[in-house]
Image (cartoon, rainbow, N blue to C red):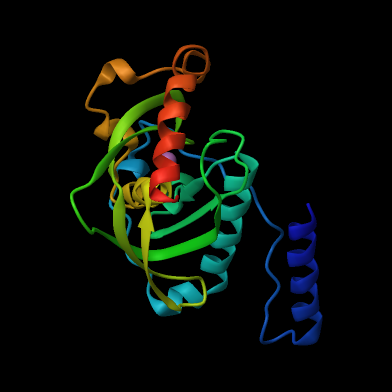
Amino acid sequence: MPLVGRRKSLRRWHHSGDERAKPPRPALTIRKIATVGHPVLRQRAREVTPEELASVATQQLIDDLIETMRDANGAGIAANQVHEPVRVAVIEVDSNARYPYKPPIPLTVLVNPVLEPIDDELVEINEGCLSVPNLRGNVMRHVNVRARWLDRDGHEHDEVKRGLTAGTFQHECDHLDGRLFLDRVADTTTLTTWEQFERHHRDAFVARITEFVRRVGS
Ligand code: NI
């Protein structure tokens, strides 16, 4: 992938440019994803300090999260899903194979994110999760949320997210509070395997959610 190639060559340049300022990081690693039942998914992940965020270990974790998310075709992944109970998550949607109806979200690194619903509007979204293999189900999500977070350089962001994008942000922030989408499935008859979703539920859901995305704009 061209993006990865560019990141790698940048890193080499930093490395050869100033050995002391930029210690070499190990190669990108695809981390093992914890699955439902693992206690790390049920812990509240802890805040990251500014010093920790700047550390090689945390920057490497962020690189690995991005790589692991992309490898698994996820729309996002939280650090505790790779056994690191810290408040870091990454999100990216770009013609996603698992969720082709999701509007694009540029790569976003969330550190210590805080979400607040802006109003009471809710939408029912069919979700899946890399930590819940082969299961999908319907959950209610806020349509409009205020999201505040730090990026990987420690810069503050304060933005409004709407629609399916807001849903993705809520799903990832739930992970950091030890919560899975399964906990929010009010109607367990909506639970399906991915195969049965494709066969029996996909068309109706995609028709409804496409109309919703058109109305809300994301
Ligand atoms: Ni998930």
Residue occupying the point 46% across, 38% down: 34
Residue appearing at x 30%, y 57% in the figure: 145
Place of residue 49 in the rendered image (x, y in percent of width and height, measured from the top left): 37, 75
- Residue 188 rendering spot, x and y as whole percentages: 27, 19
Residue 131 visible in the current orientation: no
In the rendered view, would you say 138 is above or below 105?
above
Find ligand 1 in the image and state its quadrant: top left
Q: Residue at position x 53%, y 36% from top?
A: 101
Is 147 situated left or right of 210 in this image? left
Say left or right for 137 vs 184.
Answer: right
Marks counted in the figure total: 0
Identify which residue, 106 or 185, lies in the foreground: 106
**Foreground pick, 29 / 110:** 110
Of 87 and 194, nearer the camera is 194
Q: Tell whether 215 sits left or right of 43.
A: right
State whether residue 34 is above or below residue 93.
Answer: above
* Above/below status of 201 relative to 90: above
Q: Can you give x and y, in whole percent of width and height, for residue 41 in the image?
A: 35, 42
Residue 105, percent across and down?
53, 54
* Depth order, front residue of 43/153: 153
Instruction: State left or right for residue 107 relative to residue 51.
Output: right
Asked whether the viewer can see residue 136, the reply is yes
